[in-house]
Image: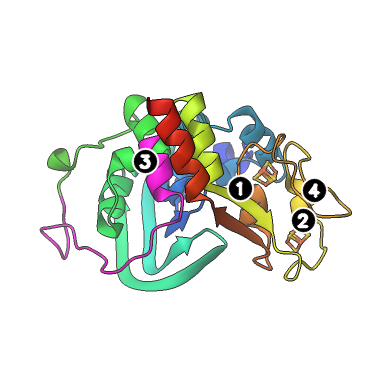
């Protein structure tokens, strides 16, 4: 893998994630944040290699195991809810979480916002790879709380339910895709071409800004990188429900 050289030059590396939702990966905290160590557009290459959120988790775990991050400090003072990491809305949570164990930190943070570890494929993979402690019973809280505080009315991303139910099989992944997929709002689009250039599989037509859904791998990079919030996530629960029902018969 290509990992930024300063990660290996520094005496000490401290991970500084924000507390936020993620439209594709559901939750982005201390575990996911290390993807920032992959330089620039090489990120797209790894998204292409691992379109499934669970497989993407393997890449994240590889980065953790290849580097030596000694402390994780999560800024949850002003968190992001909804369709993060770009199109979410601010949530004033007023929390800072600190741990030497990224998975333990995220397990607690996910609980705060109303998720469990198994709802987030990256965290499930991290637990399977023994990245840290993912069992709340074994995590000791210190500081201001003796119980995990809940963030009331924190909005989860639209894909939350779909990824939760179907994160492992290729067939059921199709259902998830139909349930929520990116669509470019032509009225909001400023034709900057950021999405076109960052799409790892060149699924977005440069002229029309239409997405070729037969090529799209659902990485949601376009949604993440559009600064004009023109890449929206469209729900089609009718189709998803139909497919789900058929496949379960
Ligand atoms: S990144 Fe957003 S504004 Fe730019 S071309 Fe794509 S959809 Fe349009
Ligand atoms: S169209 Fe968007 S979601 Fe689909 S592969 Fe390209 S960047 Fe990823």
Whether the residues at callouts 1 and 2 have beta carbons within 8 Å, the answer is no
Answer with mark 1 or mark 2, whichever residue precedes in sequence: 2
- The magenta span reads 141-168
Main secondary structure of the magenta stretch: loop
For discs 3 and 4, the disc positioned in front in the rendered view:
3
Which residue is painted at 55% across and 42% down in the image?
178
Q: Position of residue 36 (x, y in %)?
A: 57, 46
Answer with mark 3 or mark 1, whichever residue precedes in sequence: 3
In the image shown, does 194 or 172 lie closer to the viewer? 172
Q: Is mark 2 within 8 Å of ligand 1?
A: yes
Identify the image's colour scheme: rainbow, by chain, secondary structure or one colour: rainbow
Tell me the residue that label 3 is attached to. 164
User: Mark 4: which secondary structure?
Assistant: helix
Whether the residues at callouts 2 and 4 have beta carbons within 8 Å, the answer is yes
Q: Quadrant of the C terminus?
A: top left
User: Would you identify the image quadrant in which residue 80 lies?
Assistant: bottom left
User: Mark 1: which secondary structure?
Assistant: loop
Q: Is mark 3 within 8 Å of ligand 2?
A: no
């Amino acid at each position: 893998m290509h990992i930024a050289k300063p990660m290996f030059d520094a005496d000490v590396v401290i991970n500084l994630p924000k507390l936020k939702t993620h439209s594709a990966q559901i939750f982005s905290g201390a575990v996911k944040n290390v993807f920032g160590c992959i330089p620039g557009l090489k990120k797209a290459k790894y998204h292409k290699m691992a379109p499934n959120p669970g497989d993407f988790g393997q890449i994240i775990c590889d980065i953790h195991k290849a580097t030596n991050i000694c402390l994780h400090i999560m800024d949850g003072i002003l968190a992001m809810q909804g369709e993060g990491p770009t199109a979410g809305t601010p949530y004033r949570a007023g929390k800072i979480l600190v741990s030497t164990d990224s998975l333990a930190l995220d397990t607690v943070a996910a609980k705060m916002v109303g998720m469990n570890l198994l709802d987030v494929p990256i965290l499930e993979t991290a637990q399977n790879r023994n990245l840290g402690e993912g069992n709340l019973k074994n995590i000791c809280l210190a500081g201001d709380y003796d119980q995990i505080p809940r963030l009331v009315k924190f909005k989860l991303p639209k894909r939350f339910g779909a990824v939760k139910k179907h994160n492992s099989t290729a067939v059921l992944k199709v259902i998830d895709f139909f349930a929520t997929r990116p669509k470019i709002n032509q009225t909001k689009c400023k034709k900057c071409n950021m999405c076109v250039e960052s799409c790892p599989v060149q699924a977005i037509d440069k002229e029309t800004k239409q997405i070729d859904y037969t090529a799209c791998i659902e990485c949601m990079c376009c949604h993440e990188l559009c600064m004009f919030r023109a890449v929206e996530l469209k729900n089609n629960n009718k189709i998803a429900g139909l497919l789900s029902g058929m496949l379960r018969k």
